[in-house]
Image (spheres, rainbow, N blue to C red):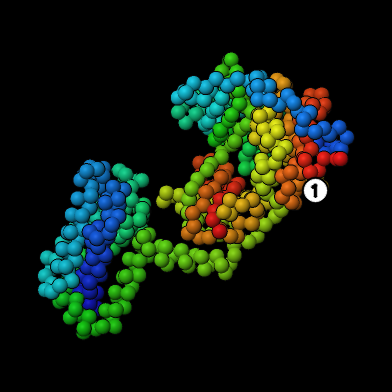
């Protein structure tokens, strides 16, 4: 824990510390050629993106995830300290469980594994109507199927009419259309709501 | 009483069939509704719209027979057969084309649910009961108007409750009213959500400066007094690094966002950029 605090202090100081701040011109090397030179991403038109994988996690061993894609293709995904992991909020590797669904983006290594830059666990995006509301619960009607959306106070964000996100979800109205980004509870019709977009 | 209940069933069935026939024959969206219905797998895409209108015509004819005198038991038999047909069609739709729309009493997309099956079952029972009617419904209503009104009211309420098409008229307003009174979602307002910070970050000049270097989504974040620190993975000159952003936590000021690219292996800040308006003079 103290290592985490030390690291955070170092990073906070790096970005907030007054000394050593340089102007934007000091980032002269940020030309597109320089930025993209390191990792060319050859994707053939029409072919599956080699640097993307999706599926359900069937095995976790060490820092490797074995994932069965929805097209039954198996993917090996390597998670590093630099990988971002999302499961409703930015989280850590130990929160990933067998049976979770996931999307991963990264770099395909020569041995076929995907070195993940980002992993989104159980992420779903769905258009729905608010059928009913309960205590911190949205009952959503998605193509005639009922989805239970749990509002997580402090985490759930609401975007009304495209304005900046707020944590107040009380402007949602029964019967209105919403788009919901959330984290699915595997093998249920329940999700935790990350962001809900609505008109108000 | 049982005789009265049997006698008024043709009125109920006739009213529901009239409503249903009007939707199928006179609605401008009837063709679109037919294409969304389970008639498509049953009779084919091309014949779905004519079949839909044919069903409407049959409904109109049976409704007219039921509502107009005289009232031979044969008419009740026709109504029961039609209702049994609906029940069978809906059961087929649910099994063979679960994504299809009911197309029953509204041209709006309405999935086939247990309620729709329940309504068809209710009409079937009403049709069978009507077989025992001894007289035309008008005579029965004239004889005992209050009792007839009560029976019809209860049955009409059952039809409305079993019709998902009508939810927007009564169920949703009721739920809206309950939400307005109990305010079940009012307790969630706790602080600035991370997504608001990320939105501000992505609109900042600092983010535009380094966007091409960023390789991952948000890795971690924490609050440091008036700032929220947000870390992304980054690649800088072929090396793995961390892009650390400081975003104003409680105000919207993308111009004040700062960024540092830190090589975590060495702890060295390899580049940083303070927001245009907050840079020291």
- For the question of whether residue A152 can be seen, the reply is no
Residue A46 pos. (x, y %): 45, 24
Residue B59 in sight in this render: yes
Return the chain for callout 1: B
Residue at the image position 32 percent from the left and 56 percent from the top? B107
Q: How many marks?
A: 1
In the image, residue B133 sits, relative to residue A9, either above or below, namely below
Q: Quadrant of residue B77?
A: bottom left
What residue sits 71% from the left and 26% below the top? Answer: A30
Q: Nearer the viewer, residue B31 or B13?
A: B31
Left or right: residue B63 compared with residue B198 = left
Label 1: few (<14), some (14–19) or many (≥20) C-alpha neighbours in 10 Å = few
Quadrant of residue A36 within the rendered picture: top right
Label 1, secondary structure: give it: loop
Image coordinates of residue B116 in percent, x first then y, are: 33, 57
**Quick one: B67 or A176, which is closer to the camera?**
A176
Report the residue at 65% width, 60% height from top.
B187
Residue with the mark numbered 1: B226
For the C terminus of chain B, the quadrant is top right
- In this view, the residue farthest toward the right is A19
Residue B66 in percent (x, y) is at 17, 69
Q: Where's residue B38, x and y in %?
A: 28, 47
Question: Where A28 falls versus A153 (above or below)?
Answer: above
The relative height of residue A40 versus residue B275 in the rendered view (above or below) is above
Please identify the residue farthest to the bottom as the structure is shown.
B143
Classify residue A189 as left or right of residue B215.
left
> Residue at left 61%, top 32%?
A119
Left of B42 or right of it: where is B165? Answer: right
């Amino acid at each position: 824990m103290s290592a985490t605090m030390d690291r955070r202090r170092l990073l906070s100081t790096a970005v907030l510390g007054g000394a050593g701040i340089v102007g934007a011109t000091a980032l002269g090397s940020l030309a597109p050629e320089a930025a993209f030179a390191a990792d060319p991403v050859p994707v053939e038109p029409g072919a599956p993106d080699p640097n993307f994988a999706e599926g359900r996690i069937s095995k976790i061993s060490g820092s490797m995830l074995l994932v069965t894609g929805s097209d039954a293709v198996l993917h090996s995904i390597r998670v590093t300290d630099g990988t971002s992991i999302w499961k409703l909020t930015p989280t850590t590797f130990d929160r990933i469980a067998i049976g979770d669904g996931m999307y991963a983006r990264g770099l395909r290594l020569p041995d076929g594994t995907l070195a993940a830059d980002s992993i989104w666990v159980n992420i779903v995006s769905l258009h729905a109507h608010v059928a009913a509301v309960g205590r911190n619960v949205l009952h959503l009607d998605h193509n005639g199927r009922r989805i239970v959306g749990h509002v997580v106070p402090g985490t759930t964000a609401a975007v009304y009419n495209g304005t900046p996100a707020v944590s107040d979800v009380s402007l949602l109205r029964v019967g209105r259309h919403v788009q919901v980004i959330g984290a699915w509870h595997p093998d249920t019709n329940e999700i935790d709501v990350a962001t809900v977009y609505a008109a108000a | 009483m049982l005789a009265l209940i049997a006698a008024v069933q043709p009125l109920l069935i006739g009213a529901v069939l009239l409503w249903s026939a009007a939707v199928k024959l006179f609605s401008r969206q009837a063709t679109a509704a037919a294409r969304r219905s389970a008639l498509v797998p049953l009779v084919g895409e091309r014949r779905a719209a004519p079949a839909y209108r044919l069903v409407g015509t049959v409904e109109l004819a049976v409704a007219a027979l039921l509502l107009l005198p005289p009232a031979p038991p044969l008419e009740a038999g026709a109504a029961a057969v039609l209702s049994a047909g609906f029940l069978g069609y809906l059961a087929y739709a649910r099994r063979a084309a679960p994504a299809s729309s009911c197309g029953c009493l509204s041209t709006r997309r309405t999935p086939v649910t247990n309620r729709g099956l329940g309504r068809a079952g209710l009409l079937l029972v009403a049709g069978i009961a009507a077989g025992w009617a001894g007289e035309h419904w008008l005579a029965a209503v004239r004889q005992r108007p209050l009792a007839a009104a009560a029976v019809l009211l209860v049955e009409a309420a059952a039809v409305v409750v079993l019709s998902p098409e009508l939810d927007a008229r009564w169920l949703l307003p009721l739920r809206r009213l309950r939400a307005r009174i109990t305010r079940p979602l009012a307790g969630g307002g706790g602080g600035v959500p991370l997504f608001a910070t990320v939105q501000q970050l992505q609109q900042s000049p600092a983010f535009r400066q380094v966007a091409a270097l960023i390789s991952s989504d948000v890795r971690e974040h924490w609050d440091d007094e008036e700032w929220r620190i947000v870390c992304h993975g980054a690649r800088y000159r072929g090396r793995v690094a961390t892009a650390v952003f400081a975003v104003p936590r409680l105000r919207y000021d993308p111009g004040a966002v700062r960024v540092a690219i830190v090589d975590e292996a060495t702890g060295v800040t390899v580049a940083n950029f303070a927001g245009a308006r907050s840079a020291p003079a």
